[in-house]
Amino acid sequence: MSFTCWVVFQENRLQSPCGTIAVKQNYFVRQLAKILGLLLAFCWLSQLAMAETLLLKSSKGVSFQLNKVADGLGVPWGMVFIGPEQILFTGRNGKIGILDTVSGVITRITGGPKVMHSGQGGLLDVAVPPGYSQGGWIYFTYSKELQGKGVTTLARARLNGKRLVAFQDMLITRSASTTGRHFGSRITFDGTGHLFFSVGDRGVRPNGQDLSTHAGSILRLTLDGSVPENNPFVQQRKALPEIWSYGHRNPQGIFYDRKQRRLWSIEHGPRGGDEINLILPGRNYGWPVISYGKEYWGPVQVGEGTEKEGMEQPVKFYVPSIAPGSLIVYSGKAFPAWKGNLFAGALKLTHLNRVEIDSSGRAVAEERLLEGLGERIRALVESPQGWLYFSTDSGRIFRLRPLENNQ
């Protein structure tokens, strides 16, 4: 069965195949329109569950179509293109696969690490450096068990047919904890021989301000795992040399914008206070001393307030929390209106978050796409064609691509 559906939300009307509703300036009419709008949204959501195509439009007038391309994948935590139409993905349960985005066929890959699949831990991110070619190094993060504790670990391997070979741990971070949460674990590359990856505070707040642990930090290494000589804490005896920035809670999204030469991160706050940060070497991003979030046990601000000398302010913060699971900077040609925008998957508030950034690195606008989809959006990746693919905690992978009239 084939099905397409328009759901367009504008200031004074709701439009769908079922008709257009004019919303007059009357409270009761507006409330009725909202209810009808939800019913119209349910129309396309029920069809999407049956693997059909949706035609949608953003508030900026960008038309796009949404397709489900895979299902039944557990929790696909990381994704990366290793060919024009091949996504290598990791499942938090330790499984690895390659998705053919045209046929939908999935090839299972063996040879991955033994992971501590507990709480938020498991097999986490996967990434390849710019210029990757078949047989090159593929980088992974995962939670490794050491004496009953989970440790964020960076590793790499090569793909040979349907098997990973030469698998090696590159850095078993100093971040052991029994909490089972806040592993961080996203990977990104600067294109000049360095990689960055994040480590959450592991559920132990003081770690964020402790330079003798990797927890609560973003780390920088060369592609072979050695420490660059110009890392900011190399000369400090009591600090770990891999640390690039610190004062982080749980950065589950980092991305290096090679055009602007900017490293971005997005991290979970507690109850409110998710942050987008522009990451600079040696800087302290405040957790847990300052935060825009509140304690889980009551309406009390975390830490000492929202600002303190010597600690960085976020480019953007979210109250309430959206629970960000990933971050990319869009650079493709398929959606020219979105070029240079930040995209983040929202887990708690179940949408695709788009943030416009000006030339000075300030957040100037936000849009929440696919709010009616009801999916916890986990990983994001841009295809060679400039299309967006995202995974969800329900085990699905979706494709978002433009309609012809965008060109």
Image: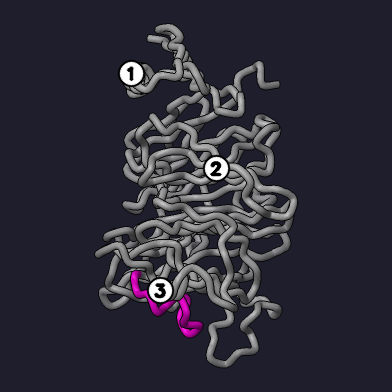
Q: CA distance from mark 1 to mark 3?
A: 43 Å
Q: Nearer the viewer, residue 362 or 110?
A: 362
x, y (%) of residue 148? Answer: 26, 74
Is any part of residue 79 visible from this angle? Answer: yes
Residue matched to label 3: 303
Q: Are marks 1 and 3 in contact (CB under 8 Å)?
A: no
Q: CA distance from mark 1 to mark 2?
A: 38 Å
- Horizontal side of residue 101 vs 3, given as left or right: right
Q: Colour mode?
A: one colour
- Please tell me which residue is depicted at 58% across the width and 69% down the height of the picture: 312
Amino acid residing under circle 2: Val
Q: Secondary structure at mark 1?
A: helix
Of residues 297 and 174, the one nearer the viewer is 297
User: Where the C terminus falls, by quadrant?
Assistant: top right
Q: Which residues are magenta?
A: 203-216
Q: Quadrant of the N terminus?
A: top left
Whether the magenta-drawn stretch holds residue 210 is answered as yes
The vertical placement of 214 against 379, above or below, is below
> Would residue 28 be found to the left or right of residue 233 on screen?
left
Q: Secondary structure at mark 2?
A: strand
Of circles 1 and 2, the one toward us is 1
Decide whether residue 171 is among the magenta residues: no
For the residue marked with disc 3, what is the amino acid? Answer: Gly
